[in-house]
Image: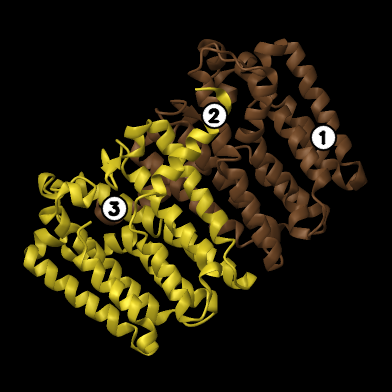
Chain colours: A brown, B yellow
Amino acid sequence: MALHETESEVARAMLYAVQGGKGLRAFLVIESALLFGIARTHAAPAAAAIEALHSYSLVHDDLPCMDDDDLRRGKPTVHRQWDETIAVLAGDGLQALAFELVLQTVCPAERRIHLARSLADAAGVRGMVGGQMRDIAAESSDRALSLAEITALQAGKTGALISWAASAGACMAGQDQGALRHYGDRLGTAFQIADDVLDVEGDVQAVGKAVGKDAGRGKATFVSHLGVDGAKRRASDLVAEACDALSVYGEKAETLRQAARFVISRRN
Amino acid sequence: MALHETESEVARAMLYAVQGGKGLRAFLVIESALLFGIARTHAAPAAAAIEALHSYSLVHDDLPCMDDDDLRRGKPTVHRQWDETIAVLAGDGLQALAFELVLQTVCPAERRIHLARSLADAAGVRGMVGGQMRDIAAESSDRALSLAEITALQAGKTGALISWAASAGACMAGQDQGALRHYGDRLGTAFQIADDVLDVEGDVQAVGKAVGKDAGRGKATFVSHLGVDGAKRRASDLVAEACDALSVYGEKAETLRQAARFVISRRN
C-alpha cells in the first residue's frame, strides 16, 4: 500500500469497527436527552462519542492477548481483517476520537466538561478498563467468581458506559442524574445477563460473535450461578426495577422503558 | 494474585509507565503557562495529562505487534515486566486518565474545552496515531522514505504532542498560539533528529532504551539522509529557529529557549 494511504487505513479500520453495532448506547444518550427537551442534533456528538469509545473497547478486547476473538458484529474482528498493529492503533484512535466528539456536545461549557470528565472516569481504570482487567484475571484464576464478584466486575466492564449513556441527558440539562443512573445500573446488569444467556442459547449467525465460549472455558457467569431460567428471571426483575426508576418522568420515559425490555429479549 | 488486587495491578503498571521520563512535555506546559502569568498549580493538570498521554503511547508502541521493545526509560517495558494484556490495558487506562486530567486544568471552561479538544486531535489519527501508523508502514515497505516524508511522519508521531505542550499556556490564557506553535514544531523535529542521532551515537545505559535499531532495520532516518554531522547541523538550525520564534516574549521565554538547546545536547 502506498505510504499516503496508511493513515487512512487506520481510519478505515476505525470506521469498520464502529459499524454494525446495535447502537444501544447512542440510543440511550439521545433518548435521555429528549427527556429534558434537548434536541437530537445537540446530543448527537455525545451519542457518537459513546459508540466510538465502546467500539474501541471491543477492538482491544478481541485482541489475541485479551479474549482472542475472530468474530464481532457478524464480521471478522479488526485484527483478523487487518492485523494486530492496526487493531491496537484503531482502538487508540477511537478512544481519542470519543473525547474529541463528546467535547462537541451542544450544552453549556461547564456541563460539557462534566460530561467529558464522567466519560473519562467511566472509561478508565475505575470503570471499563478496571472491569476488563478483573474479567481477564478471573479467567486465569483457579477459583470461580461469586455472584457478587461477577456483578461488581460487570458493573465496570459494561455497566459504566451504559450508565453514562443513560444519564447523559440529565448531565447535559444540568439536572439530577439519580433516577437515570439507577435505571442505567439495572439495565447494564440485565444487559450482561442477557449476554450470558445468549452465549448459552444463541446462534452464532444471529449473535454475530462466538457463542458457547463461557462454558467452554469453565467461566463463572450469571448463568453458571443461576441457571438459564434463574438468570432470565433475574434479568426480568432488573428490567422492572429499571423501568420503575423512571416513574418520575412518567409517560415521557416510555421509549427508555421499551429499550430496557428489548435488552433482555434481543437475539444479538 | 487475589481478585481485588487485579485492578490495582493495572494502576501499578500505569504508574510504572509514567515514571522515569524526562518530563519534557510537562515542563513545556508549565513554562508556556508561566509566560502568561498562569500559576504552576493551575497548569499542573494539563502537564500531568500530557505525560499520561505520552506514556500510554510508549507502552503501546513498545508492544510486540508494534516496535517490539524490551527496554524503556532504563527499565523493562510494561509487557516485559507484566504481560501484553496488562500493557494494552495500562495504555488504554492512561489515555482515559489523560483526558480526565486535562479537563481539570484551572482556566475558564471554554478554554479548558479547547485545550482538551486540541489534545484529542493531537493524539488521534490525524496526529500521533496517524504518525505511528505511517512509521510502522514505512518499516514494512521496500521503499525508503524521503526526508520530506520522514519530517511529515514525525510531525504526527512526536511533533503533535510536543507542539500541543508548548502552546498549552497560550491556550489557557486565551492568547494567540502562533509563536509557541512555531517554536513547538521546530522543537519537535529537532527532538526527533536528536533521537535518531542518539540511536547511532548513544549508549544503551545512558539512553535507557535499545540503540542501533534504525540502522539494523535499514530504516530511513534523518541521520541516514543527512549523515550524523548534517543531522546535528539541521537540529541546531531548527533550535535557532525555535528560539527566534519566541522573540515576541523577550527575556521571559529564556527558560523555553534553554529547553530547546537541551533537547539537542541531551544524552537520553
x then y, percent, for residue B210: 19, 45
Instruction: Relative to A147, say whether B137 is above or below.
Output: below
| Amino acid type of the residue that numbered disc 1 sits on in the rendered structure | Ala
Instruction: From the image, tell me which residue sits under label 2.
Output: B5
x then y, percent, for residue A79: 39, 34
Q: Secondary structure at mark 1?
A: helix
Question: Quadrant location of residue B268?
Answer: bottom left
Instruction: From the image, tell me which residue sits under label 1.
Output: A242
Instruction: From the image, tell me which residue sits under label 3.
Output: B134
**Marks 3 and 2, the one that precedes in the sequence:** 2
Visible residue check, residue A27: no
Which residue is nearer to you in this view: B24 or A24? B24
- Tell me what residue is drawn at x 43 percent, y 39 percent: B13
x then y, percent, for residue B32: 43, 75
x then y, percent, for residue A186: 77, 33
Which residue is nearer to you in this view: B31 or B162? B31
Q: Residues within 10 Å of mark 3 (few under 14, many from 20)?
A: many
| Amino acid type of the residue that numbered disc 3 sits on in the rendered structure | Arg
